[in-house]
Amino acid sequence: MFHVPTNETWDPEAIAERLREQNLEAIVLADSVRITLPTTPPSNLFERLLNFVARTGPHYMVLSFDRRQFISNIAAEYNPLKISTDTKVFTQIGKACEEIGYWYDTDRKIALKYCPDSAELRDLLDEVEQLQIEIENFVSDQNFEQAAKVFDDKIILKQRIDAILFETTGKPDDSADDPVES
């Protein structure tokens, strides 16, 4: 979704500045950007009561650069139970990324910008899309164990795609520098 191209560097200050220009509260913490998501007032009595009892505060999203990823190397961390993925903030983040030269697109389009003629890459991307459909079908059937297994397969394929892109672009894969967890 969000990608820092190989000719650019991660600049959390620039992202935060662009988000603030769009009236989002964004601050830089270490090498990440924390966005305080706008809250909407409760629309009915039940929501107001739930808000009062649960004392829900502001929700946050954190953007950080993950050098071990190639395609989606800007990680967006948030609680999906509290933040809808159809929220306007994703469009705002995409706009901020594009304004400073980062890419906001599908994994397929980003990968094929680097390797437009790679049949292997296209096949792997097709497999990833097929696995996503399988995951969605298993979840709708409430077969979460099988969905988790297919999700793991999807992660392995995405790692292979990233490895191909690291190799093709000559960009070092820094994941070897990370300590191995036991």
Image (cartoon, rainbow, N blue to C red):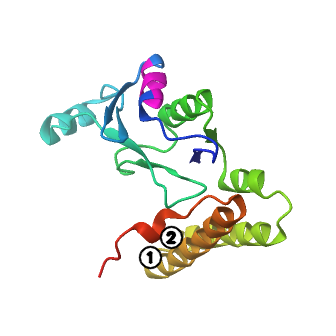
Residue 19 part of the magenta-drawn span: yes
Tell me which corner region of the image, top left, top right, bottom left or bottom right, holds residue 100: top right
Q: Which residues are magenta?
A: 14-20
Residue 179 part of the magenta-drawn span: no
Q: Residue at x 48, y 33 (%)?
A: 89
- Residue type, numbered disc 1: Phe
Q: Residue at x 49, y 36 (%)?
A: 87
| Residue 76, image x, y percentages | 44, 47
- Residue type, numbered disc 2: Val
Q: What element does badge 1 sit on? A: helix
- Circle 2 sits on which residue? 139
Binning the other alpha carbons within 10 Å of mark 2 as few (below 14), some (14 to 19) or many (20 upward) gives some
> With 1 as the anchor, is 181 left or right in this view?
left
Is the C terminus in the top left, top right, bottom left or bottom right quadrant?
bottom left
- Circle 1 sits on which residue? 144
Distance CA(mark 1)–CA(mark 2): 6 Å
Q: What element does badge 2 sit on? A: helix
- The front one of 177 and 48 is 177
Binning the other alpha carbons within 10 Å of mark 1 as few (below 14), some (14 to 19) or many (20 upward) gives some
- The front one of 171 and 111 is 171
Q: Residue at x 31, y 25 (%)?
A: 41
| Residue 94, image x, y percentages | 57, 35
**Rendered view: 124 above or below 99:** below
Question: Which residue lies most toward the right here?
Answer: 117
Of labels 1 and 2, earlier in sequence is 2
